Amino acid sequence: MLKQEYAQHIAEMSQRVRCEEWAELEKNKEDFFETGNTWALSWLGHLTVLDAAMYHYTGKAEWLERVKECLGIFFSVQDELVQRYEDGSLPFIYKQEDGKPIEGPSKNPLEVLEENDTDPWHFQVVETIFSFTPVLRGLYIIGRDAFTQAEWNRLETLCYAEINHIFRDCEWGRHNRATLRAIALLLFARLFPQNASAARCLKLADMLFEDSLGNWSIEDATSYLGLWVNSIAEYTQYRGVWNFRIEQILSYYCHYYTAMLLPSGGLPEFGDTRFDSGTSTCLSLGAMELMAKRHNDGVLKYAIERQFRNMVKNRTMDNGVQYERGMTNAFVWADDSIQPEEPGLLSCEVLDELVGKKAVFRDGWREDSTYLLYNYRDVGPYGKLTRDYLQNTIPVHAEKPHHGHADEQSICALCSGGAVLLRDGGYRDSFTTNGHYRADFYHNRLVMRNGRMFRENGFLEYAENIGDYLPVRTEKLFFHQFAGAEVIKTRLYDDFHNADADRHIVYLKAANAFVVVDTVHPRAAQEMTTGVMYHAEHISPVEPGVYRVQEETAEGLMHFHRYKSALRAHAQQSLCIAFAGEGVSYSMEAQRRNYRQETALSCYTSRYYGADEYYSYVSLLIPETGETKQEIEAQRARALGIVHSLRTAHTRMGRSLTVQLKADGLEYTIGIQCDDGACIEDKNLRPTYSYEVGRASYGAFETDAKFLVSDGRTYGMIDGSRVDHRGKTLFSAYPNRCNQLDFVTVLQRAGTWGSYEDVLAGQPEH
């Protein structure tokens, strides 16, 4: 991918914005003067930097003239603002309070100036950190020499008015709004070093960045995290700061975005963001181009190319102008000499079990590849000062600090055959302090509630509440890739509901199907209502316990796109969801989600749990894809055949679970030891466990492993010492001489192996 592609797109966007927004210019200006709406001219700030980037690239005077035309509008608005203030004709600063008129800049919607500052030349004319910082960036790209002294003096007055308020409205911490403020201050200090406030701007910028440099962000949201990462990259370039701690963080997050790329080439949604959003794409591109250049990294260049071309081809921009936010950085920092290289891995963790806490399952990097994104990230044991500051300062009761959702152990996206089959719940319809789209019952996950249902008609009706975020803890127990299957197991610790919950996701690669197992384990004898939820716009029942989810509609995918793509002609694909479990009920309930009316599908129980009891739900997800109606109908018949073969069994109190099914000539067995302590014989011994105590039967298999999977030809296990099949030992760990706690006594006993796999017909070699 060459810079010329950026240039072509930026030039096109500049022309589009100029044609479309200019027609509303006078209306936007009057909106600002009448109401104080500082977002009214937001588009003008983004247009300015687009034109500045083109001038930097081409050197053509026409682009500089366009920049100055945009700046001239800002000048005229500021002039008129001052004049109207002095004439007493600014409606938005004359308000009623307790039935009495009040006056003055300290009581208007722009109440952000420092105390006793009534200078109208210090009023904002446009919102700063999202809308005017692009102007500062554009000036930095162009440089001082492109302007006369008179022009530069006028710019200094305008720019000071836009950054002055930050000293009063000074959000700090490891999140996007703090670093965005700092970038505005830093650019002002770099552009106008002789200004009387330059030194304090630089000082505050450094202070605001101090906690972010070389540290993890507290934000778990695709786009807001991108804002933070892009700001870190900008800071290093404007401030001339670089060290190995900054490098490792930027490298981490750039590869984090690479690992989770959707089959389309865009980015998935988690937290406060939108699915396959052009904004998310642009926000990640700048830092990725910077790191690709520093390391000559072809994999990052591949991810950049996929994202950019998807955005342009499918017109995924949420807003025709705001999406500049990282685009100009990518354009300026891009290196044409780097050759794209497809990543050398498919399914993987994204990128770890401490900070990222996600996993992707995929069978390729094609647009029609099968893909599932799983998120189990909790708040995390870091960034506490920032988290506490935000929760004690702004109304964020519904957020996992910050901009995160109650989406622990949720499926954020499932795609196959070029179709989007499951997706997250969206951002929000409007500003709200409740759990709108953020609460657990908006996500594809297990939801737990205390008590039992009474008159409720469905699970959502019982589970739905105001949606305040209730902290939980999560951890990964294992992620493993066998030849024929891939699996992740995570655990959620929920103190509020006094219960824990495990989720297994098993990807059966040859069958192109996912088995999802959710196991509830209350910590005491108690009543609980729990359910597994899936959401989509169109869900229909097929037969008891079996449902069909229609692929995401074009309108759903393009809801926020400024420019709608032409609809591709194709047959409607679908996802088969089948449930298994004892004593379960099902409900389909209307729910507003993703800015529209959707259906919440639940498989649930409302029951009494005995002490140390386990209960497991099993969901089978089978994509029904194809290029023609005939192919899709054949896949639907295939899916039903697999569903009809689905069998489950569990031992007493649910301590172990067997799942069996048949697909395409293969007979699958999945064995799960739900009780971690099932193999413990004596805590005073080492090893404390033994095969004799921990063994359980899973169909034709017997093992003490925590997990077993077989397709009838091969098998694999995790954390076990022995596997038998039809009475024949396939694998057995050697017994060792194990020192005991007194370091005198010795016990001869086999320890477990972390994992093992082999063909059923073969004998393993130790």
Image (cartoon, grey):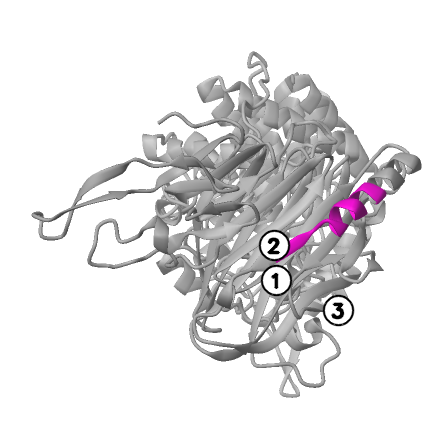
The outermost residue toward the top is 337
Relative image position of residue 652 (x, y in whole percent): 50, 66
Quadrant including the N terminus: top right
How would you rate the neighbour count of disc 1 (Cα within 10 Å): few for under 14, some for 14-19, many for 20 or more? many
* Residue behind mark 1: 438
> 451 above or below 28?
below
Q: Is residue 577 magenta?
A: no
Residue 521 to residue 78: above or below: below
Does 647 sit above or below residue 737? below
Looking at the image, tell me whether mark 3 or mark 1 is earlier in sequence order.
1
Q: What distance separates the C-alpha of mark 1 from that of mark 2?
A: 8 Å
What residue is drawn where x is 65% and y is 45%?
A: 514
Q: Residue furthest left?
A: 744
Q: Which residue is mark 2?
A: 272
Q: Could you say whether the residue bearing mark 2 is in a helix, strand or loop? A: loop
Write the start and end of the magenta stretch as one range: 637-648
The extreme bottom residue here reads: 99
| Label 2 close to label 3 by CB (< 8 Å) | no
**Amino acid type of the residue that numbered disc 1 sits on in the rendered structure:** Arg
What separation in Å lies between label 3 and label 1 (alpha carbons)? 21 Å
Dot 2, how many residues are within 10 Å of its Cα: few (below 14), some (14-19), or many (20+)?
many
Disc number lying in front (3 or 1): 3
Can you tell which mark lies on residue 587?
Answer: 3
In front of the other: 54 or 87: 54
Q: At label 2, which amino acid type do we have?
A: Asp
> Do the residues bearing badges 1 and 2 touch, measured as CB atoms within 8 Å?
yes
Residue at x 44%, y 44% (from the top left corner) = 478
Q: Earlier in the sequence, mark 1 or mark 2?
A: 2
Give the mark nearer the N terminus: 2 vs 3: 2
- Give residue 122's quadrant in the image: bottom right
- Disc 3 packing (10 Å; few <14; some 14–19; many ≥20): some
Which of discs 2 and 3 lies nearer the camera? The answer is 3
